[in-house]
Amino acid sequence: MDKVVRMSSEKGVVIFSKSSCCLSYAVQVLFQDLGVHPTVHEIDKDPDCREIEKALMRLGCSTPVPAIFVGGKLVGSTNEVMSMHLSGSLVPLVKPFQANLC
Amino acid sequence: MNSTSTHFVPPRRVGIYEPLHQIGMWGETFKSNIGNGNMNTPSHIIIPNHQKLDNNLSEDTSHGTAGTPHMFDQEASTSRHPDKIQRRLAQNREAARKSRLRKKAYVQQLETSRLKLIQLEQELDRARQQGFYVGNGIDTNPLGFSETMNPGIAAFEMEYGHWVEEQNRQICELRTALHGHVSDAELRLLVETAMKHYFELFRMKSAAAKSDVFFVMSGMWKTSAERFFLWIGGFRPSDLLKVLLPHFDILTDQQILDVCNLRQSCQQAEDALSQGMEKLQHTLADCVAAGQLGEGSYIPQVNSAMERLEALVSFVNQADHLRHETLLQMHRILTTRQAARGLLALGEYFQRLRALSSSWATRHREPT
């Protein structure tokens, strides 16, 4: 879906979320802790919510939200982000997008 | 269990018509016991036998009732119809034989049930000794341990009891292996087994969370001291890493760095999940308090509130996923021997907590 491709290709970390999804919120908090400001799309506020959900599922997400993209590439859902962080591979991945904290 | 045995009649007293009367008696006491709930064993042990007995009863009572009223007629006609007598006697012998067989089967079933009951009581005692939370007692709650009588939770509690027993056994094996001279290959096998055992627990918890997420979240299946450390249905992995770190063999600098990084990542992930949980609490509170409070009305958007609660299941799963990943990472960072030592230390830590719970529970019983 074009919209999803466009939104996910935005620079940095993109999170597809829903306003009611607290697990998505947890993922946001994690990225913020790592010094990254993710772009969050709350798809339940989007009129094309259903299509976006379907597109995300087709891309390989087990649940439509949260769906996390870094540098245009799909990382996965909460499970994948947590696994990557514990194995130490998340920080290097988001390093180019860390905000300058000064 | 005790009431049916009083109706047991010794075989030698069974005459031609008695077995049919006997069956009737068993059937009555049996049925009344199920009805009154006097049986303090789980009903599933008894019911299949009940149905079997019932079918046989209906078969034979029709036979018997056909026979009994004609008793006096039979005496009058015996002199005129000898083959009728023979047939009747054969039928009675057959009925008596069937009755004896049924009685035997019934007694065997009773014996099996009795043994099962003893076994269950022993398990219950063992569980209580280990400081488990067990319900109101088997005599008041015949369907199982769980207050909610949720079959998924009752099954989980039973499985968890076995899980702990198996864990204790594995810990002993690890201890023996580490103090002896065991090959790395054998140690590796013990480490793999221990890891798989923990993964099995996470699988069990995930299934139980679908049955009753609050049960898993509140750690009701754990002992009291374990519950003190509860974080989303289990231990905080970063806390456990902190507890275990001093107990490892010599670690290389790289390993120390890796473990510290792991602990930090773990803490960050835990904080993120905790904040997610807090948000969930706030949104649920808002949802429940919505509309007019004080009018005696229920939640205006109860479906929305229910959806919030569904989200708890994913949090529990995510927390267990974190525990799972921490175990995997430690396995990657450590050598086989170090991993074995770590798993042993972890297992003993849990054992100590359970023992503490037990001591705490029985502290008032000590005569002072």
Image (spheres, coloured by chain):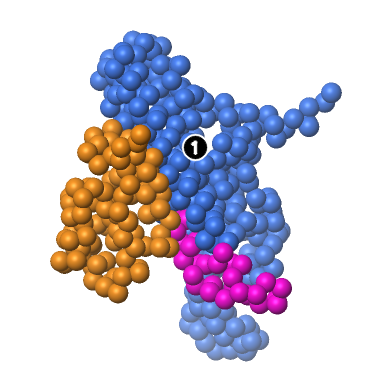
- Pick the residue in front: B101 or B256: B256
| Amino acid identity at mark 1 | Phe
Residue B77 found in image quarter: bottom right
Find chain A in the image and tell me its colour: orange
Name the residue: 59% across, 67% down.
B288
Name the residue: 41% across, 49% down.
A26
Q: Position of residue B96 (x, y in %)?
A: 55, 68
- Pick the residue in front: B90 or A3: A3
Name the element at disc 1: loop
Chain letter of disc 1? B
- Pick the residue in front: B326 or B346: B326
Q: Position of residue B180 (x, y in %)?
A: 38, 11
Residue B10 found in image quarter: bottom right
Find chain B in the image and tell me its colour: blue
Q: Which residues are magenta?
A: B286-313
Q: Image check: A23 left or right of B189?
A: right
Q: Is residue B359 above or below residue B93?
A: above
